Amino acid sequence: MIVENSGTVLSVRDLTAEVEGTPILKGVNLEIKAGEIHAIMGPNGSGKSTFSKVLAGHPAYKVTGGEVIFQGNNLLEMEPEERAQSGVFMAFQYPLEIPGVTNLDFLRVAYNSRRKVQGLEELDAFDFDEIVQEKLEVVKMNPTFLNRSVNEGFSGGEKKRNEILQMALLEPKLAILDETDSGLDIDALKIVANGVNQLATPDNAILLITHYQRLLNYIVPDFVHVMADGRVITSGGKELALELESRGYDWVLEENVSEVGAK
Amino acid sequence: MSIQVTPDLNQVGVVSSVDTELLSLYQTQSIAVQEPELVSLLQAIRDRAAETVQQSKIPTTRDEEWRFTDLSALKSVNFQAASSSKPNLAALESLLLPEARSRLVFVNGVYAPDLSAVTLPDGIIASNLDGLPPAYHSQIKKYLAQLPGAQEVFTALNTAAIADVAIVWIPKNIVVETPIHLLFISTASNTPIVSQPRCLVVAESNSSVTLIEDYFNQMTNLEAEETEAEVGEAVYFTNAVTEIWLAENAQVNHTRIERDSPEAFHIGKTAIAQARDSRYTCTAITLGAKLSRHNLEIFQTGEQTQTILNGLTKISGNQLADTHSTLALNHPYGTSLQQHKCIVGDRAHAVFNGKIFVPKPAQQTDAAQLNRNLLLSPKARVDTKPQLEITADNVKCAHGATVSQLDDDEVFYLQSRGLNATDARNLLVNAFAAEIINQIPIPSLQQTLLKTINL
Ligand SMILES: Nc1ncnc2c1ncn2[C@@H]1O[C@H](COP(=O)(O)OP(=O)(O)OP(=O)(O)O)[C@@H](O)[C@H]1O
Ligand SMILES: [Mg+2]
């Protein structure tokens, strides 16, 4: 929701980044305020995941220019864990499997690392269990998933739900959800979307990366941006997503060639 | 110390005198037993082994069995027999396992009765040779130094120097409820010392026991301030031999932990005889020593045995840890499940060689071996060699070896959830190690070891 006079959560200016010497992000600009839900759409390979990983601090991506201010702080100077601890959360497009670490232990370690930074006491297994049980409700996840290794043998949809469970526990200020809807059947999509809606508040912000308008029927964005070739080439309201759905990307790309070229 | 040069050793030229020095180490240890019958038994065993030693050479990297493990550093140290040294019980506090109500403690290879404690029901024996009831005196020669492989040079060196023996003897049909802890402590000293501990375990038919065999350097466990300031890392040589006999349907769960000083040398032999229907489980954890070698040899003497071998090596710095296992099956219906993992950091070097023999008579054998290695640095190295020799035609044998590194994306995933890079790496390394450590049937020991594994 757009909230009058709300503070800026994220401000990205002319962000450029490369991987192994190849430029991927070529000048991204984006401003997100508290309470807002933004969606980024765009063709495959346009740099959407790269953008989200750069925000989360993945070491494979080298920032070559521009700035990212998160709640008044220079995000790019922070280690990945500091970003997480200060409220940035990215739900992975492809969540990793971690054999040998139980989901419950993983969730508790993550939860406690956040609490430590907030100056709160770490929770033992017993107290944590109560909290996690409550959060399982958000994504309607079966408690048996807690005792399995992190994401190991989870179906695609179960992995995505597990990401949202982590979001529910960590209560981020900025949640970046990279294709959390991909590969979900309609029931799972409703559950995940409903979970995200429960977690959205006037104080936090959500950045959805998606290819499908379908998700945006359930999580209604305030702004929709189109990313192509490492830039946000156009932005609009939720209607833009509908238009992209029916007309594809070509018209946006064409309309913006002149604009981008003139820059 | 007199140096005898045998004709055989003369032939190897320059290395012979250093060889001889190491090989004459058995002469530094005298028999520490009172009972005349046992003294003469030990003397006979020692004499026979001394002959073997005199005809042996210290292996070099030209020997196939020692290709990756260069013993020159071991040969260049001048080891002395240990002088008596007694740590007090308080210093050992952290090593004691609350689950194990009985322990035998040996300090530099010498039995320490005042540090030991045995609380076992009547008939179950855990003692040194002097504590062995006379009824067993005549029986012991059927077992002591009787397993195949006794000719191997370090085994013979140990046998030629047997001064005393840690004995665990479980009579027929007895299930020992609490684990028995065999603790071998080396104490730091200015002169490098040698100790050659010896264990003998006999599990009679239908008996069951859990054992922890633990090699530790006392100084490495002091408070950090004390260790750094007062003593360097202790240099010593432990040459240990353990023989375990499982009679029909016996079960032995054996945990072996080597956590010697990072400057120590450790060569250990575990030799097992498994009679029909017996079940032997070994969980061997190798953490310490500059150079360590574990020779694990299983000899099946009857059909339908079960053998479970778990191994974990975690080394860093310039450590070298070599595990050579041999599973010699000779009877039908045996099963074996071997899983060996190595975590190698810095410039350390791990070696794994797993032999499994399945000759013609061993039909219906089911053997599986898996070796997984995690390299934590670009200079870390692992040499792994499965060696399956199968001539029986109706068997199931599987083996595999993998080498991997910590996955940057996994580390990042954990960091993105708030763990710092070190904690993230530790969590992943721990998860890799836990699969083996969780096999140890002693919860307190699992906890201690998992903490030690942290980077
Ligand atoms: N680690 C990497 N190494 C090499 N190339 C990479 C790497 N990561 C991304 N790229 C390249 O960067 C470009 C952008 O990839 P990115 O994953 O950000 O696209 P995307 O918009 O998320 O695509 P999709 O919609 O398919 O998820 C692609 O051409 C991709 O191949
Ligand atoms: Mg993507």
Image (tube, coloured by chain):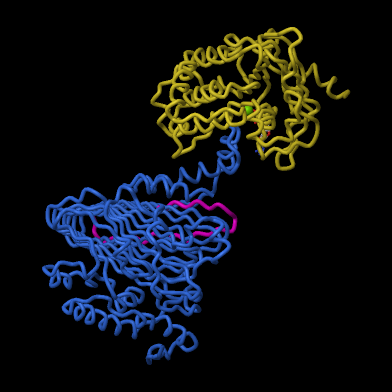
Q: Is residue B190 above or below residue B202?
A: below
Q: Residue furthest right?
A: A262
Q: Is residue B392 above or below residue B190?
A: above
Check if residue B19 falls in the magenta segment: no
Q: Position of residue A133 (x, y in %)?
A: 44, 20
- From the viewer's perspective, is B300 left or right of A214? left
Which residue lies at the image location 57% right of the left edge and 12% below the top edge?
A197
Q: Is residue B444 visible?
A: yes
Q: Position of residue B123 (x, y in %)?
A: 14, 58
Magenta span dominant secondary structure: strand
Chain drawn yellow in the picture: A
Q: Which residues are magenta?
A: B371-395
- Of B311 and B86, which appears nearest the observer? B86
Q: Colour of chain B?
A: blue
Which residue lies at the image location 62% right of the left edge and 12% below the top edge?
A201
Check if residue B389 falls in the magenta segment: yes
Q: Quadrant of the N terminus of chain B?
A: bottom left
Which residue lies at the image location 37% right of the left edge and 91% below the top edge?
B6
Q: Position of residue B289 (x, y in %)?
A: 47, 64
